[in-house]
Image (cartoon, rainbow, N blue to C red):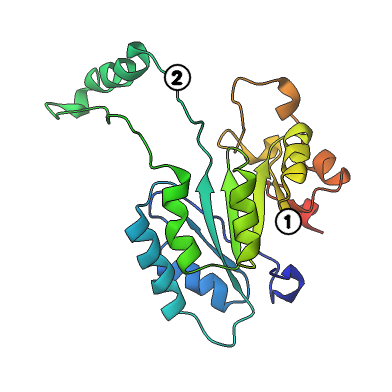
Amino acid sequence: MFDFSKLKHPIIQAPMAGGINTPEMVSAAINAGAVGSYGFAYSSPGKISEDINAARNLRNAETQGALNCNFFVFPEKIKYSTQDLDGPLDALRSLDFVGKLELEIPKPPFFLDLETLLEPIWMEPPEILSFHFGVPDKEIISKAHAFDVSVGITATSLEEARRVEQSGADFIVAQGFEAGGHRGIFDPDGSAEHQVDCSRMRSRRVRYVDCADPKLFR
């Protein structure tokens, strides 16, 4: 498993889905001795393999950094109504700048299943594999460990942190409410326990903190 203490700089460059994390950005973080991350939630298996290899080709052999590949854990079934789909379209069409653009809601399935997305990971294992919005099946975590890959999972509450700990993951990415509205909450309709700050989560022995307050990184 990857030893975070070997990093030259204890920094994790954030994974951002949608192509923002380019191979140049990721490899630059790795070559600086930090963790370079890809956000692969919306990528195809072919693109995932291509990006991993591109970052490896730009990676210095003597670097003390590491590669992290991040994925979303979506619910098996997403509940939605016609209003959920039509509402955003109607709102966009009401805007003057849209003009006569043809807008269309994507058709199901809205995303590839996690097992399919992970296929290129097992072919080119990174040092770190991380997950957002939920806990993957234990079989996935066990398979990552079989490839000597460290697994981290985001938690936004103490209850989520307990679930991550019980999953067998190697570390928790703790997001307090300081991180803003875009957090990896397991259930957005859940309890108000998600209104916990990073200092409280860290006091409960959460091992890695992702939030806006730099004082908590001491």
Answer few, some or many: residues within 10 Å of disc 1's Cα (few below 14, many 20 plus, some between 14 and 19).
many
The quarter of the displayed image where residue 204 is located: top right
Q: Position of residue 160 (x, y in %)?
A: 72, 35
Three-letter amino acid code of the residue under disc 2 = Lys
Against 116, residue 180 (above or below) is above
In the image, taking residue 212 as reference, residue 40 lies left or right, namely left
Against 99, residue 10 (above or below) is below
Picture residue at 52% right of the left edge, 85% below the top? 60
Mark 1 or mark 2, earlier in chain: 2
In the image, taking residue 31 as reference, residue 191 lies left or right, namely right
CA–CA distance between discs 1 and 2? 31 Å
Image quadrant where one finds the N terminus? bottom right
The foreground one among 170 and 68 is: 170
* Number of marks in the rendered image: 2
In the image, taking residue 102 as reference, residue 67 lies left or right, namely right
Which circle marks residue 170 in the picture?
1
Three-letter amino acid code of the residue under disc 1 = Asp
Image quadrant where one finds the C terminus? bottom right
Picture residue at 53% right of the left edge, 40% below the top? 73
Which circle marks residue 79 in the picture?
2
In the image, taking residue 42 as reference, residue 15 lies left or right, namely right
The foreground one among 41 and 201 is: 41
The quarter of the displayed image where residue 6 is located: bottom right
Q: Secondary structure at mark 2?
A: loop
